[in-house]
Amino acid sequence: MEVRTGKTLTALAIAYESGAKKVLFITKKKAITDIIDQAREMGYDMEIYITNFEQLQNVDCSFDYIIIDEAHSLGAFPQPSKRARELKRICQSKKIIYLSGTPSPESYSQLYHQFWVSSYSPFGQYKNFYSWAKDYVNLKKKYVFNRAINDYSFADYEMIKEKTDHLIISFTQKEAGFESLIEEQIHYVTMEPSTYKFADKLKKDKIAINGEGQVVKGDTAVKLMNKLHQIYSGSVIIDEPQRTAKVFDYQKANYIKEKFKGKKIAIFYKFVAEFYAIQFVFGKNIEFDAKKFNETTDTNIVFCSQIVSGREGVNLSGADDLVFYNIDFSAVSYWQSRARIQTKDRTKESKIHWIFSLNGIEDKIYKAVQQKKDYTLNHFKTDFL
């Protein structure tokens, strides 16, 4: 079901109507409080235990129903993730409901290990992903550091759909009666001249030394991609003499404060140092609790969260606008985090603002994730090298 269309309430209702007595609900840590409130409001006569993915090793197998929130996080391939292996232990012979707004954000191969945790997988006859891939994947080669590796991402959509369609309930925001759909706007901020010189120096020499003698290295393509992503937004991780985060350009934070003055905004950032910049500019007016933020009427209060930790299960419907200080490489992050401002009953505009540095890297990332593709090293090499 599309994001914000009531997956939690639907899943709990299905479990109750199906006679569940003891339900395990697995979700992200930040979503637990909101789910507890929803379960309490429904008043169903069943025991509900809510935990996060990081605590799976402490969970026993005594539940008769398992609800797996953000199930796409199990979709790693060709090997199952640690999370998927833990869930397979817990879920043996249990009824399962999978919840996701983006079940296969990058490849339909991501569905295999989601179903693999279940005793009733439609692909149960296959011993592992590799044997499944022989029938369902058009195997190709890709090159990483001039080394050929197998690319299993080109799965046969029609074949998979035929096997899984009867197991899936789909529901869109339009069908749910959403009055306010997402509107996106890009803002371009001109960073300090020294920021662009810093980025150019690193691109050219793969190493840069600032006026304080601190060294930043971009001596591999991966390091260079990550360092440029940081630098264009005004911060960086120093490599020598000791590894530390440094802010050197506050243009984005200052722009946000001035541009959205008088509005109640939530800010998502990518790198930890970006929060330092936000904190410096906004001072003590920062809130980390989404529920408290939604309840306040003080437009000076700003909600802050890192993208990855806030992209799922967090309700920011109390915000006038949602502002992204930077953008993540992940397509899942894009589609999930932008929906945090929406609810079915919201009538005011659902506005998303992307704060990009002029001539930076963010535009390239944005174009990739909009197409449900992660921004990868191959993208970066094409765009910048």
Image: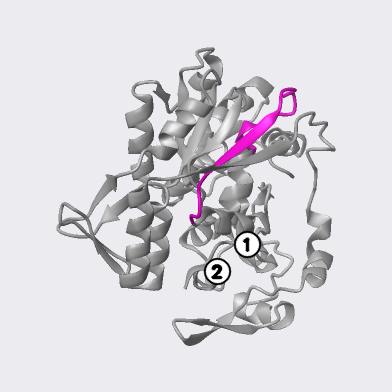
Indicate left or right for 253 with 74 as reference. Answer: left
Residue 264 screen position, x and y as percent = 54, 21
Numbered mark located on residue 373 in the image: 1
Residue 131 location, quadrant: bottom right
- Judge left or right: residue 242 versus residue 69: left
Asked whether 174 or 256 is in front, the reply is 256
Q: Is residue 230 left or right of residue 175?
A: left
Task: Classify the position of the N terminus by image quarter.
Answer: top right
Q: Give the quadrant of residue 6.
A: top right
Per the rendered image, the range of residues in magenta is: 339-360
Classify 166 as above or below 49. below
Q: Is residue 349 magenta?
A: yes
Label 2: which secondary element: helix
Q: Residue furthest top?
A: 297
The amino acid at mark 2 is: His
Q: Earlier in the sequence, mark 1 or mark 2?
A: 1
Examine the rendering and report whether any part of residue 250 can be seen: yes
Which residue does the image show at 27% across and 46% down from the upper left? Answer: 246
Element at badge 1? loop
Read off the residue under disc 2. Answer: 379
199 within the magenta span: no
Q: Is residue 67 visible?
A: no
Q: Nearer the viewer, residue 336 or 11?
A: 336
